[in-house]
Image (cartoon, grey):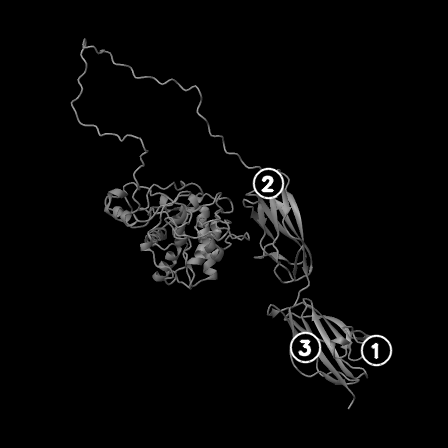
Amino acid sequence: MAALFGRRMRRGAASTAVAAAAMAALSASGAPSAVGEQPAASAAERPSAGASGQEDPSVTGDSPYHTDLPPLKGPGRNDPPDETPATGSAESGIPATVLDAYRKAEASLAASNPRCRVPWELLAAIGKVESGHARGGRLDTNGTTPSPILGPVLNGVGFANISDTDGGAYDGDTLHDRAVGPMQFIPQTWESWGRDGNGDGRRDPNNIYDAALAAGSYLCAHDRDLTVERDLHQAILGYNRSQEYLRTVLHWYDYYRKGAHEVPDGSQPAPGAPTGTGGKTPSPAPVRPGTPSPSPTKPGKPTKPAKPGDGSSSKPTPPPTTPPPTTPPPTTPPPTTPAPATRLVDLGDGALSAPAGERFAERPAVRAERADKKPAAQAKVRFTLTGETGTTFEGGATTVTVTTKADGVAKAPALLAGGKPGALTVKATLLGTTEPVTLGLRGEVTAPRADKLVRTDETELTCEAGATFAGRIALTATRDGQAAPGVAATATVLAGADPADGEKAADQGPYFLTPGDEPAEDRRTRELTLTTDARGNLLLPELHTDDTTGTFRLRVETTGGAVVVLELKVTDPA
């Protein structure tokens, strides 16, 4: 789970019976910190794996979580008469960017999954328990944490045992998984539920917009309606299978529903290191071998002051003085700021290419490097599309900005080829430099293609010599089972019924007439090019015959390799 946090004593809460009861109810749960590890609720209190509505493993791998409760009511407290949080209270404040992410996730899910009805206050409750709202809103301008928020190593020691599933890509651990980010997803769960909440083309568990949308999507799984109590509880328990976790989240959910307000990012203190033991009894401090145990002091008579002349001095002995240090204490050097990025390197394997109307197989990618050619993290790269092909990034934008990770790599969202074939350029510009560095990545939109071509009827194609075939031949082209519009096709009349007769156009037999005012004899052709209409349909011109009888073939092939071969029979006149 998110960062581990120690319990904070709330002023006055310990003196009330209500506060004491609430704290006792939470005493079994752990308190996580940003780097430390504490046990979560015990296995005995978790629902069994595979229970209805539960995922295995849970979103967080049942990692520790923050156990603080919202302010409690009680006798003798100077609280408002109702149960609404006091306006502007510190506990009801949510950092601006984090609050914006929760609300945008609610709006997005309301459009894509209206049945679920996930409230942003529920996302806020989970975000509070998981990471203290991304460590009090410590985020960059894109909503990403400057450093990863990692849960404990899930190695089976006090927690679930989950072997590495991501090669350390998300959590930096190649042996075991760890929960990552403001909403604390373990890598394998993020692979299934990760979302792009801020439209930058990446699914980053360390980004609050991506993480909040992913959390909401997970809570809505199994066709849940979160206004139904059973569905709500199952969704929360799917996040962390602990009854104490469920109760803690519900406390914050109820609290935020009664009132919450926006505070500046980073204005709240970051959650500290854990102070509780997570329900475990601390072990006694070890005693080194050979060290004498201290003996208890027995009570005795007070020592009388010495009298003058009894051999002791009547003057008090001054305490020894410690000479001042001659060497100043060492100082911690100030942190060094990494050198900025100065260049971009194209990571593509070649020219970007895709047929019109399809997705490019390769995404534009560059690496930002410093002057010493080492990767530059947190660099801003703007990708801009130019050209007349109508190509866009996924989502419809033609300009996107991406922040590089530790490896210096910035990868643009997927490209969707427009409907017009032609050349295009993806400009990658390194921002934040005195003179912006721009790299041009060449691309091309090729002609639309079809992978299947079929005739729409099965009428035998037979005609007398010197006449015209009855009806026009109609075909339909598709791509991946969908109509393929704008696809070029070539129709060729071939001699003979056997492929061994060759694939060249015949010099006699059936023929087409090209448009024009010239005599028909001059407009005869046995090979022409056509294009499918908006529905992928292809209607050939009329086929005429000369005085040559016999069997011929009509071969129609589209861009993309879809082929149909039809048999044409020309008989003697009746």
Q: Residue at x 56, y 48 (%)?
A: 402
Q: Distance between the residues labelled 3 and 2?
A: 60 Å
Camera-nearest residue between 458 and 316: 316
Determine which residue is flagged by label 1: 521
Residue furthest to the front in view is 290
State which quadrant residue 549 falls in. bottom right
Q: How many marks?
A: 3
Considering only order in the chain, which callout, 2 or 3, is on the residue closer to the N terminus?
Answer: 2
- Which is more foreground, mark 3 or mark 2? 2
Q: Where is residue 181 in the image (x, y as percent from the top left)?
A: 45, 48
Residue furthest to the bottom in view is 574
State which quadrant residue 291 falls in. top left
- Asked whether the residues under the numbered discs 1 and 3 touch, taking CB atoms below 8 Å apart as contact, a structural biologist would say no
Residue furthest to the top in view is 309
Determine which residue is flagged by label 3: 474
Q: Where is residue 308 in the image (x, y as percent from the top left)?
A: 19, 9
Determine which residue is flagged by label 2: 374
Q: Is 300 on the left-hand or right-hand side of 7? A: left
**From the viewer's perspective, is residue 192 above or below residue 76?**
below
SS type, badge 1: helix
> What's the amino acid at mark 1?
Glu
SS type, badge 2: loop
> What's the amino acid at mark 3?
Ala
Q: Position of residue 245 (x, y in %)?
A: 35, 52
> What's the amino acid at mark 2?
Lys
Q: Residue 284 carries which label?
A: none
**From the viewer's perspective, is residue 303 above or below residue 374?**
above
Residue 541 shows up from this direction:
no
Considering only order in the chain, which callout, 2 or 1, is on the residue closer to the N terminus?
Answer: 2
Camera-nearest residue between 163 and 437: 163
Q: Is 303 on the left-hand or right-hand side of 141? A: left
Q: Distance between the residues labelled 1 and 2?
A: 71 Å
